[in-house]
Image (cartoon, coloured by chain):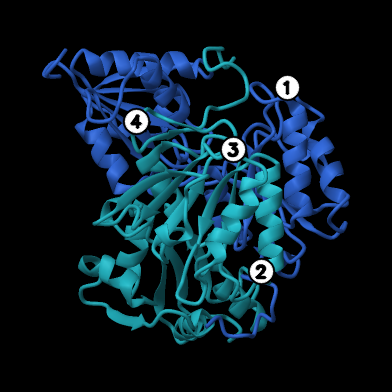
Chain colours: A blue, B cyan
């Protein structure tokens, strides 16, 4: 193992929100270069056309640590592995499982296997693009999943972000286990924002069948989201364009007509 | 103007961090489709090979409102315009100037010109990919530019994000006008995080000549950043892999060995 000659590589590939048009050229190159591709089966089906002739290892949802370990193991036996992550691998994706696995093996950069992270368009960015300009000032990205994080910490973050007037992008707003989380989150945010604050529910952003729903904070309900939805809550400055499904957060707190310098 | 037959379109194209490999296929398609391309000249030079045969309108930095107005005007006279933004157009990019311009004209979706936003890889994502897995839990994105936002609001956000244990991604950490801003920000964050908290300075992330510097919060200094730098400050959970320029924020607050379910 000293010279690494038997080692391959792991490219951690963020494929974007699902629609093939949002893939980057770097992600496509990494997939082309790989001889083994491993990932959650839904993501692999989204890039099926790029996987012909490769060894493809579709895996079930969850078990991310096991998937990362499998990718590293394959790289250590000489394969060029593409470990596929949805959206951006570094945002609630496979980056932490991969580096936790490498850390546990005592791996350091420069040692085999070679590891690269290929960034991609995140679900929140795909949602924002459909909405116009909702994230156009400081924003906070929060997952409502309490599988690995105590709910109390999540609530503290929602409260801090709401109090400091961040736009909020909420991931994992609902699941069969967590039917009241989003209503709880809206309740916290209502203490700091007006009832008119725009709230967007974007489902399957950047994929076929994408849908956008707009509500106000006063009327938004948790049941409007499911596990495929990203929820964006505007800041005090965010406004809706007419009755359209477009949200605009201006770049700052001064007059929109003022030059930016 | 009723039927829109004389109208063209505006595609707002986020070209990613600069290196052509981080462009998405959708962004490349939009550039191919355009007959006029307008944007900050540095961004246009990064995609020069894709602009042959087109009318190219390179513009100076700043004056984003004017650039957006020019793009809309060209679309209203029948052109297919690509308005180019660095990184993701919706994150400190041209999305707000464009939609503020459209709003001021009374434009609504469905009316001409046709407007689309093409998301791209942001500077923070490109920086995170170089660092491994720093953004792998909830994070807050904050611009230290006080051109359009009062410094007091920026400080409140830094404090809120630090207190609630977000990873922080700091944009516009320095300029010739703002030499002490980042030191001020570090001072605020030190009240909530230990001196050992990892801090990354990533310059020109995702472009040729990219560099990564790692410090700890106790020793980090504002002069380590310039206007081409994104600064990432870890949460209480973020750790450095050995002495390497890699940061790992685990996915949650439970044991790394625990299955994710």
Per the model, the C-alpha gap separating discs 1 and 4 is 29 Å
The answer to whether residue B195 is above or below residue B123 is above
- In the figure, residue A4 lies in which quadrant? top left
**Which of the two residues, A31 or A106, is positioned nearer the viewer here?**
A106
Please identify, in this view, whether the residue under mark 4 or under mark 3 is nearer the observer.
3
Q: Please tell me which residue is depicted at 31% across the width and 20% down the height of the picture.
A: A56
Residue B155 pos. (x, y %): 67, 60
Can marks 3 and 2 be said to lie on one chain?
yes
Depth check, front residue: B199 or A120: B199
**Cα–Cα gap, marks 2 and 1:** 42 Å
Callout 2 environment at 10 Å: few (<14), some (14 to 19), or many (20+)? some
> Is residue B111 shown left or right of residue A184?
left
Residues packed near mark 1 inside 10 Å, few (<14), some (14 to 19) or many (20 plus): few
Say yes or no: labels 2 and 1 on the same chain: no
Question: Looking at the rendering, which quadrant does residue B246 occupy?
Answer: top left
Q: Answer yes or no: are tags 4 and 3 on the same subunit.
A: no
The Cα atoms of the two marked residues, 2 and 4, are separated by: 48 Å
Q: Are marks 2 and 4 on the same chain?
A: no
Task: Give SS at disc 3.
Answer: loop
Do dots 1 and 4 share one subunit? yes
Q: Residue A174's spot in the image, x, y percent?
A: 71, 31
According to the image, label 3 marks what residue? Answer: B194
Query: Residue beneath label 4, please?
Result: A48
Mark nearest the camera among 1 and 4 is 1
Q: Can residue A36 be seen in this snapshot?
A: yes
Which of marks 2 and 3 precedes in the sequence?
2
- Name the residue beneath numbered marker 1: A176
The label number, if any, that marks residue A118 in the structure image: none
Residue identified by numbered label 2: B151
């Amino acid at each position: 193992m000293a010279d690494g000659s038997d080692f391959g590589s792991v490219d951690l590939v963020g494929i974007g929100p699902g629609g093939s048009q949002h893939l980057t050229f770097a992600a496509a190159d990494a997939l082309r270069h790989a001889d083994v591709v491993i990932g959650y089966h839904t993501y692999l089906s989204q890039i099926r056309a790029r996987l012909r002739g490769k060894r493809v290892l579709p895996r079930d949802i969850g078990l991310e640590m096991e998937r990362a370990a499998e990718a590293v193991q394959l790289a250590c036996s000489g394969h060029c592995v593409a470990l596929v992550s949805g959206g951006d691998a570094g945002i609630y994706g496979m980056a932490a499982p991969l580096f936790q696995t490498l850390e546990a093996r005592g791996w350091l950069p420069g040692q085999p296997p070679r590891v690269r992270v290929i960034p991609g368009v995140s679900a929140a960015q795909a949602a924002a693009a459909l909405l116009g300009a909702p994230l156009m000032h400081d924003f906070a990205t929060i997952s409502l999943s309490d599988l690995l994080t105590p709910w109390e910490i999540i609530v503290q973050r929602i409260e801090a972000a709401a109090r400091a007037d961040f736009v909020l992008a909420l991931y994992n707003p609902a699941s069969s286990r967590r039917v009241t989380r989003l209503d709880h989150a809206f309740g916290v945010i209502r203490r700091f924002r007006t009832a008119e604050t725009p709230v967007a529910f974007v489902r399957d952003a950047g994929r076929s069948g994408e849908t956008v729903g707009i509500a106000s904070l006063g009327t938004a309900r948790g049941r409007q989201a499911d596990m495929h939805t990203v929820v964006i809550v505007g800041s005090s400055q965010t406004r809706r364009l007419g009755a359209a499904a477009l949200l605009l957060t201006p770049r700052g707190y001064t007059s929109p007509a003022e030059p930016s310098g």
